[in-house]
Image (cartoon, rainbow, N blue to C red):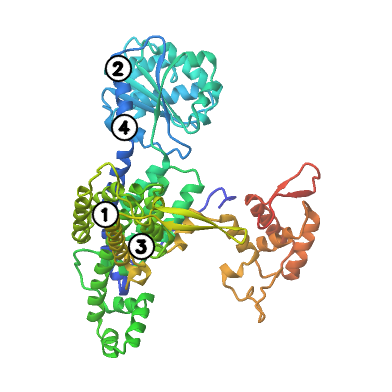
Amino acid sequence: MEYEKAYVFRAEDERPAKRQRTEAQGLHTSWKTRRQAYQTVWQTQKEAIDTKLAQIDDATVDELSTFLGHAVQTPYVDRIPTGIILQGADGGCTALTQLTKRLDSAKRRLVVLSSSTGSNLKAILKTLVQKATRADIGVDEDETEDSHRSRPNATKLLNYDLQILHNFVIEKGIEQVIVTFEDTEAFNLEILSEVIELLSCWVDRIPLVCLFNIATDVDALQRLSKTAIKCLDGKLFDVAPSGDAVEQVVEALVTSGSPLWLGAGLLGMALERQKDYIQSIGSLVDSVQYAFMSAYYANALTVFLVQPRKEEVTGDYAEALRALASFHAFAEDLLKRRETGRLRELFNDDKQVYQLAIHHIEEGQRALRRMIVAVRVIRTMQQNLPQTATSSLSNLYTQAMSGRLPGSTLLRSLLLLAKKVPSDVSVALLEAVLEVEGFGTVAETSRPLLDQLRDLISQQKDTAQLLRSEDDVKNATLRTTVVAQKVELSKQKSALSEQDKAYTSLLAKIASMFEQYFNESIVDPKTLLFHEIFIYDQKSPYREVFTPRPRHAIERALASPHDYLDCDCCAPDRDGEEATLSSTQPPTAILYQLYLESGNLINASDLWQAFQAVIGDEKEEAEAMALFQRGLAELRSLGMMKPTRKRVDHVAKVLWRGL
């Protein structure tokens, strides 16, 4: 059809048979329920994330709003009011998004320009005029341009003339036109200087305001022309660092009440990728959304997370529950305890398995919520204990979900330090811990200890002197003795008062209370029965989507085509070695293996002869040449070789395997 001038199409009289709709069977019966559950859960989760992210830049957005309002009330005639927003290297400026929601689109126009807008002054001005004049909702760009051109007795203006914007401002009563340069460092500085100088000529007629998003340093604007710098009246705005935004996302994940929890491996990989690659906070939110979608779409057992349950699950779900690794461990535990009757009921009665799953899923989610409260208690203790660094919530969450937090060095050091603090620190510590939301029944135990501590402090005669523990280093002295001309140092406890002894005993009770609380609240999530349902921690689909390796996949496909084609002709032999340079392999794979054996410059004639020798006499020379040329074209399109001017009959090798 590519070479024929015309062709005849004969439509068949018979209509194609209608596809019969097959009802979902087995585990697929819950697909619609799980899809609806995902949409509901993620909508709640997204609202929680947006609320947290909006809070971190509230101060910056308020300052920007005040700055823009002052610019409206005090028109500039010589210089452009300019806001310089330091948003960090990740480009995660959420302040601009929040500012857009506050602007009155009827009186203000926000124009966002990126470095890809245009390569010259005319292209940038054209984009600026078009975006500013088509800001009306429901008005098309062409209709807006036609409305400006169709005025009676009006001069036809070029599409990059700022007079169009001036006429639009007067006609619509626009109070402010905000021009935002999204990636300032990526702009051509000469073109950017020309844009600023030209805008300064119109600032007395068009109420212009410029916003520069800076990812590195304010010194980046110093490379503008001196004339352009004199045209700006700048004010600096600093948004929250990217680490704060990441912590707010994790905070939203653990406090939104979602029935699904992200595992330590998956979330740790997402946080590591966010740290290694300079990306906006939106990429982290997208990765979290993909994790939620993968859990509900790929795991049919997430139907047990739906509340309320609208449908009865089939017996296939009972078999899927019995196939989980946590259920296998539970069954082995029943055998060790010689509860064979209970185990026999679980294998024979599906309802027993359903009830067991529902009970332990709810119990496991309650255990995870208690563990999050314990994580908050740890951070509160770190904030109130002297000389202790406060760990991030994301770090503590990944440690807790991986099972590395129980009995860790972090907890032991906190408990030891809690036995050494003076009386003022211990009182502030208990008061802060009692304010932690969800501390629950432990408050009933810790509150009497706080009352005893306050009574002990009130009984002290010298209120200016603090009570100190026996374990405090200030209550120990070093003793020096000389034995056989050798100096020996020994630590000796100072004499303690009765109140200090009582205080030491009380601190021991407080430390014991914290230790018991951590032992009961912090568990290894992998030991929870049916944790595979409410904890999603599968890395394979996530890694392939967010950290793909296309070159590795292409090299592997060309080097081992049998792994993808699953054909008998290229199958490995009895020893497990795959056949190489076989005529049954795809032509591109044959050329790739010959390509690997070549040097930097490949003689096309020698490559053709080698290819023809591998193909053999099975194909005619014309057909073999067509396959050879197509294979070369595919390798060139993959970027593995290119023509070279050094030798006309050679091709240059561009890529090497494994690099």
Disc nearer the start of the sequence (1/4)? 4
Place of residue 93 in the rendered image (x, y in percent of width and height, measured from the top left): 40, 36
Mark 3 or 1, closer to the camera: 1
Residue pictured at 31% horizontal, 75% vertical: 26
> Which of disc 1 and disc 2 is earlier in sequence?
2
How far apart marks 2 and 1 lie (CA) works out to: 67 Å
- Point out which mark residue 499 bears: 1
Q: Residues within 10 Å of mark 3 (few under 14, many from 20)?
A: many
SS at circle 1: helix
Cα distance in 3D space between marks 3 and 4: 37 Å
Q: Residue at x 75, y 62 (%)?
A: 611
Per the model, the C-alpha gap separating discs 2 and 3 is 50 Å
Give the residue at mark 4: 59
As rendered, which of 558 and 287 lies closer to the eye?
Answer: 287
> Residue beneath label 2, please?
72
Say if residue 482 shows up in the picture.
yes
Disc 3 designates what residue? 295
Dot 4 amino acid type: Ala
